[in-house]
Every structure is written in C-alpha cells, then in structure tokens.
Amino acid sequence: MKRTLLAGALAVVALATTACGFTPLYATPGVSPGLAAIETVAADGRAGFLLREQLDDALARDAGVSPAYRLTFSVQEHRYARGVRVDNIANRYELLMKVKWRLGDAKTGAEIRKGETEATVTYDSADQPYAAVIAQQDGQERAAAEVARKIQLDLAAWLAGKKA
C-alpha cells in the first residue's frame, strides 16, 4: 500500500515538474556547445596557467571544434597576513585573486562580454619552507577553481539568455 502511494506521489511530482516550464541551465539548447566553443588564453604567471586549466575543464573545451569565442583575462593576486604568532611571524594568510576577463569573437576579436570576479581563500603557513610553498600553491589552486566556476556560471547564464 505504501509503495503504491509513494509511486503515485512520485508520478504526480514528475508531471508537475515537467509542466512548470523549469529547464536546467545546462539543458538549455546551445549552452553546453557554446561553452565548449570558448578558447581560453592564459595570462602570464602560475595563477594565469592554473586559471586557464580550470576554465578549460569547467567549459569542457572541445579541441576538435574551431572556437567561436576567445576568453582572455588578467589576474591580480594579493596576499595578506591574517594570523600572527607570539614571535610576530605570520602563520595564516588570506589570498585574494581578482580576475578581469573579456570574451571576444574568435574571428573578428570584437568584444562580446566582459566582467570581473574575485575569490578569497585562506591557508596556513608552516614553519618548514617547503610546506609553506605547498600551502601557498594550494591556495592559488583553490582560488583559481573558484574564479573559474564563477566565470563559467556567468557565461552559461549569458548563453542561456542568448538562446532563449
């Protein structure tokens, strides 16, 4: 009895959801192929390389398709000491990554869309030099992943609105 009631309730919910007009963002026609047609150009430095790698993964870049768009960006990083030990040595840092990006037409270079985004991450700095470098690099990787996610969502929403 309970199983029949549960199956009936699920069927009603499924029918109501399809009738409401809800469409997932990435199911909108043209969003996923549009994102895959964006070529990213890396900015100078390690942070630029990390961000390009994250964007290529997030946008699911299809190397077999000639790009329709070209995404360029500049990266600024600021590191602030946030935790100080008794001997006045910082042991916790805040990394702020600011990115200005520009989406242009791949053929003409005309600007289509631009934006700015940022991400802030914190990390602990160890007493050992190697561990401190690894902690800073991990912070850069996490900040790049967060910025890439924000840019991907912005571009996906723009593509979904453009195709609608």
Image (tube, rainbow, N blue to C red):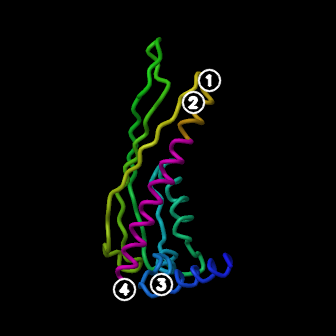
- Mark 3 and mark 4: Cα distance apart in space: 22 Å
Residue for badge 2: 132
- Mark 4 and mark 1: Cα distance apart in space: 54 Å
Identity of the amino acid at label 2?
A: Ala
Residue for badge 1: 128
122, above or below 147, in the image: above
- Mark 1 and mark 3: Cα distance apart in space: 59 Å
Identity of the amino acid at label 4?
A: Ala
Q: Which image quarter is the N terminus in?
A: bottom right
Provide the major secondary structure of the magenta segment: helix
Q: Earlier in the sequence, mark 4 or mark 2?
A: 2
- Examine the image and state in which quarter residue 23 appears: bottom left
Do the residues bearing badges 3 and 4 touch, measured as CB atoms within 8 Å? Answer: no
- Examine the image and state in which quarter residue 104 appears: bottom left
As drawn, the label of residue 16 is: 3
Identity of the amino acid at label 3?
A: Ala
Name the secondary structure under disc 3: helix
Is residue 154 rendered magenta in the image?
Answer: yes
Do the residues bearing badges 3 and 2 touch, measured as CB atoms within 8 Å? Answer: no
Name the secondary structure under disc 1: loop
Q: Residue 32, how many percent across, how many down?
A: 51, 78
